[in-house]
Image (cartoon, helix red, strand yellow):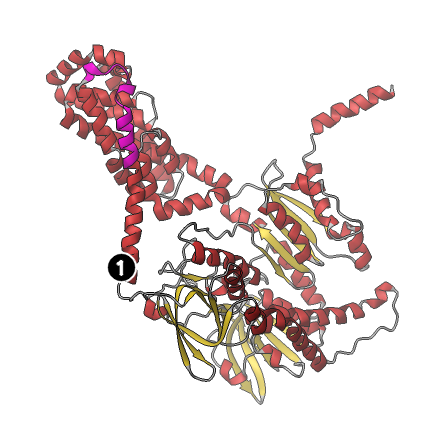
Amino acid sequence: MAARSKGALWIAAAVAAITAVVAYRHFDLGRLLTLEQLKASRDALAGLYQRAPASTLAGYFALYVVATALSIPGAVVLTLAAGAMFGFATGLVVVSFASSLGALLAFLVARHVLRDVVQARFGTALRPVNEGVRRDGTFYLLTLRLVPVFPFWLVNLLMGLTPIGAARFYVVSQLGMLAGTAVYVNAGTQLAAIESPRDVLSPPLLASFALLGVFPWLAKGALGWLQRRRVYAKWPRPRRFDRNLVVIGAGAGGLVTAYIAAAVKAKVTLVEAHKMGGDCLNTGCVPSKSLIRSARLVHEIGQAHRLGIRDAQGRVDFAAVMRRVHDVVARIEPHDSVERYTRLGVEVLQGHARLTGPWSVEVTLADGTRRALTTRSVVLATGASPFVPPIPGLDAVGVLTSETLWTLAERPRRLLVLGGGPIGCELAQAFARLGSEVTVVEMAPRVLMREDDDVAALVAQALRDDGVHLLTGHEAVRAEVVAGEKRLVVRHGGREAALGFDALLCAVGRRPRVTGYGLEELGIALTPRGTIETDAYLRTRYPNIYAVGDVAGPFQFTHTAAHQAWYAAVNALFGRFRRFKADYSVIPWTTFTDPEVARVGLSEAEARERGVPHEVTRYDLADLDRAIIDRPAGAPGFVKVLTVPGKDRILGVTIVGDHAGELIAEYVLAMKHGLGLNKVLGTIHAYPTLAEANKYAAGEWKRTHAPRRLLEWIGRYHAWERS
């Protein structure tokens, strides 16, 4: 269908071009392309129109369409000619439709011939433009059409590269160009008084066009004001506010939001229904990494003989391991405590918050009493909770999640992990190293589906080496208890098999917490992923209500929630002066398996899927001195860098290996501030360190892009010096 559409477009363009050439030669319309010739030929052209009105109109129309479609200079003179030949009314109609049709043809040619190439090469940089056009394309285009400072032919081509629809482009162009067309056609009726095209555009007329150009933005502001009035219509606005900001949820996003608000002397209330610090501190990042640390030590003790240490033994006391996990959480708790944030100037309420209006929040405290708060703005940072799929029988066998796992006092002999994503892989490896028999069931064809194949393969092999049994491509059908044994029935290739287990850990993803906060009553919309729908400024349907973190997406990372919190806090408190769009261009993430996986920017698979031109440079950690020192058995892993072809600009980096989460920071900094691989290569890295891997990866890129022809001449120069 696409090929047929392109073929039809080219046929239509060819027919129009032939028609224009015939008209050009038959009626000698080339004389119209200069003002002097037009003035000299005015009477003859008018006579031609009187003798053969239909053919003259048709020839003129075809010429104008093709001239516009092919961006041929002379549109101003052709428009003046319409007034001189046909009069104001007929000329306005003919030019209006001819110019819009020609603009549409130019638009379609740019779309079908150029857009794919341009988007493939500059898609990442053009993403904000594409999103802006999708959201406000009508206003952008109308502004460009109303202001004659912008060449219409350039507007036609540029808009063809954006996602704006062809029908919308045509309608807006027809309306937007009407005012300017009327001015020029009317001027053409007074051709004798015009000495140059500049005479048409007098300063007062240009000022009028400028005012017309401002109109879409004024209209947009007015529409926004009307929309806000409609949204807030049934909600009475308080005469005064108790607070500048109420933050619901004391995870990473909520804590940072409250911290910033207090730092700029705003009156802020932070409400948390459970534990301060949210999931990351209490059930997520902190406890899981504490468990992983103990498991890694057990693994290292098992490898001690490779370092010349004999008879090293590490007997796992699982209860002691779990006590240490809880001790680590307790030691970090003061950083996120009520006492600390109270000292910072934040009012902290421990209870359940519910929106009762755009400016009002009701808090049910632990003792059952309720407090009503009024606030200028609200930030929702309610986080997410583990998702348990509706598999028959799960209730009967019992399910652990990343929230309830930490209640274990005894190590499960057989642990079944449902899900081969980051959480599933991390915990599966940790429990296997601590002595459990671990099986991972993953429906997808491999683990870590968001990573490249080579990354996932390396991690999968590491899991197998640690004794984890990987069942990829297996679908969980039901859970059951047979003869006192808990079992999970899985299906693979049309066959079913039963897997016995003592504990089942569900790690298939997390679901945003959106119920019980009054969102339904306020009509705050959700996305298909279940997150709260926000705009680029993190605002919900109500411009004074914001959302950050897991409940807002698009990433479920602690550091992303903290990153969003800055934008939400500043926009909520100072948005009337200036607002900031949340920036997700450089977001790193790490999977804490052994080896670790860290990434920022595009992966190789993403670049291929999006059609982004790229080069891949890879450096294996097995060649790094410090990795050899630390890993006598061999250092698994690599640094993989994606760059713009022929340039050192970084598109994305994936690191697999020890401390990859730390190593990625250098590339995050480089991408954030536009530094290329040449800058990384030119930076001194201490020896021997793992960070040298970044320098050597940059060196690999430099070696493959060396100026070989120049080096040949330099070699000849040195040979000449030796002679």
Residue at 31% across, 41% down: 166
> In which quadrant of the rendered view does residue 196 lie?
top left
Residue 567: x, y in percent? 48, 55
On screen, residue 713 versus residue 282, left or right, reads right
Residue at 22% across, 12% down: 39
Please state which of residues 394 and 525 is positioned toward the viewer in this rendering: 525
Q: Secondary structure at mark 1?
A: helix
Residue 470: x, y in percent? 63, 68
> In which quadrant of the rendered view does residue 11 lie?
top left
Q: Does 207 appear in magenta?
A: yes
Quadrant location of the N terminus?
top left
> In which quadrant of the rendered view does residue 177 lie?
top left
Prevalent SS, magenta region: helix
For the residue marked with disc 1, what is the amino acid?
Answer: Arg
In the rendered structure, which segment of residues is drawn in magenta? 191-212
On screen, residue 163 versus residue 428, left or right, reads left
Q: Does 61 appear in magenta?
A: no
On screen, residue 295 versus residue 553, left or right, reads right
Image vertical order of residue 29 relative to residue 626, above or below: above
Residue 388: x, y in percent? 50, 74
Quadrant location of the C terminus?
top right
Image vertical order of residue 199 relative to residue 379, above or below: above
Q: Which residue is mark 1?
A: 230
Image vertical order of residue 559 relative to residue 409, above or below: above
Residue 685: x, y in percent? 75, 47
Mark 1 crowd level (few <14, some 14–19, many ≥20, 10 Å Cα)? few
Residue at 29% across, 55% down: 227
